[in-house]
Amino acid sequence: MRVSEAYNQIIDKARWSHAHGRSVFHIEQPDSDFARLFSYAYRSQTIGTFHATRVAIEANEKDLTDAHVQACLDRARVLLEQLEAHAIDPVPRDFRSLVSTLYYYDRWVNEVIGVLEMALARGPNPRLETIRLRFLRNLEPVTAGNGLYVATDTKMPDQGTFLVPNLNISILPLIYGDYHSWNAAYLVADRPGVSLHRHRKGAEIHLGFSPVRGRTILGPCLADVEEGYAMPIPPMSDHGFLNTSGHEHVLPFVFGSLLLGGWGVFFDVEPRPQDLVRMEEHHLESAAMNHSVFLDRVIRRLLAAKATRREVIVPAERAGSDEIGGLELALTRVGHDGIDLSSESYKIVSVQAGKGRVRLGATESEISEHDYFGVPADLTCYLTQVGESPLVFLEAMMMPLRCAGRALTAC
């Protein structure tokens, strides 16, 4: 597996620590910051590469007769399950992010590669070789990078998606933070879209990026949409989307819960079949549709702004509850003067227009439309416009709520 010099240097410090009684006196705060970035990059593979590879291996095991190969694949499955479960653990902000979180991501990933190679050494197995190559291809953007992991929603990677039970839609996980995640649902042309469902302990924001044509559903109501939109969805709210465009459509969505973490969407799903004929039609921005927002209109307004400007388009109280917290979605236009994105909470950024340069901790990267990246809490982050076109991005945060009378306000 290809690794960058930055990755190699930081993981060598972790290995030295384990080889010398877990000594940590050689680890400084910049090392811990780098480890956090690489750890979050690995975490974003939880339901993508790690889960999909395990599923592919289980499917390949059905026709095996070689006991040695079977033992290798059994070990690979155990390691992949550990990699999936590792996402539940918090990413510390000190030396433990290196000697524990990142160290075990690296160790288990390399063990998976090793046991797959041991199985292949037994004899040709084209399907298993394909599984190994796809595993490597999906993880090398992490290990060969500089720590600032940038995802994109422009294509579905092989062996990197999750099929949601009971909904039969493929999900591409993009960025996983501490308590929320940004994902993309791929809707094929010959199926109706996203079946009605709800989450017991999670909030969501559905996003429609143009071109879009369909009907978005919230509770007993629906609204026609033919342009970009953002729909906040509190827990225990039925929701879905009917794709009437006649072509494939990508439906980005943010899921969050202070109780479940950002990956909770994948097991906190309850199908809710209903008769759509009985649903009431409402305007997208109406109270019945939880004051959803026409996203393209806000983007055009900010593109016309002359200076850096930030607007909260979905307040946290609209997508959440006092129990699980709330999802806030903001839209920002940033110019050549730049903007400080440092925060006490994890942020996920989705670039909507223009190009920019992001500096996160000690590392930098170019970003453009369709790119996504995460900003861990308490890491310095600065974003500036590159070129003449304005840079516009969405920013999602999960935050606690407190009850003040009948109103909910963000802490």
Image (spheres, grey):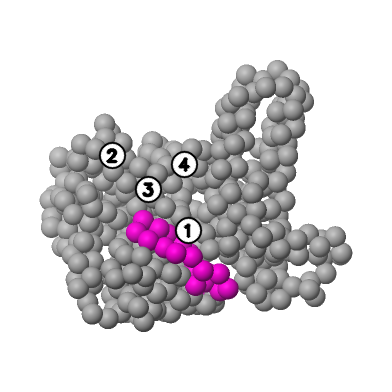
Q: Is residue 163 above or below residue 304?
A: above
Residue sitting at 85 percent across and 60 percent down?
19
Disc number placed over residue 169 in the picture, else none? none
Q: Earlier in the sequence, mark 4 or mark 2?
A: 4
Residue sitting at 59 percent across and 41 percent down?
135
Viewer can see residue 89? no
Residue picked out by circle 3: 154
Three-letter residue code for mark 4: Pro
Residue sitting at 31 percent across and 65 percent down?
354
* Residue bounds of the magenta highlight: 359-377
Is residue 373 in the magenta section? yes
Element under label 4? loop
Contact check, label 1 and label 2, Cβ < 8 Å: no
Element under label 2? loop
Q: Earlier in the sequence, mark 1 or mark 4?
A: 1
Contact check, label 1 and label 3, Cβ < 8 Å: no
Residue picked out by circle 1: 150
Residue picked out by circle 2: 248
> Which secondary structure is most common in the magenta stretch?
strand
Contact check, label 4 and label 2, Cβ < 8 Å: no
Element under label 1? loop
What distance separates the C-alpha of mark 1 from that of mark 2?
Answer: 24 Å
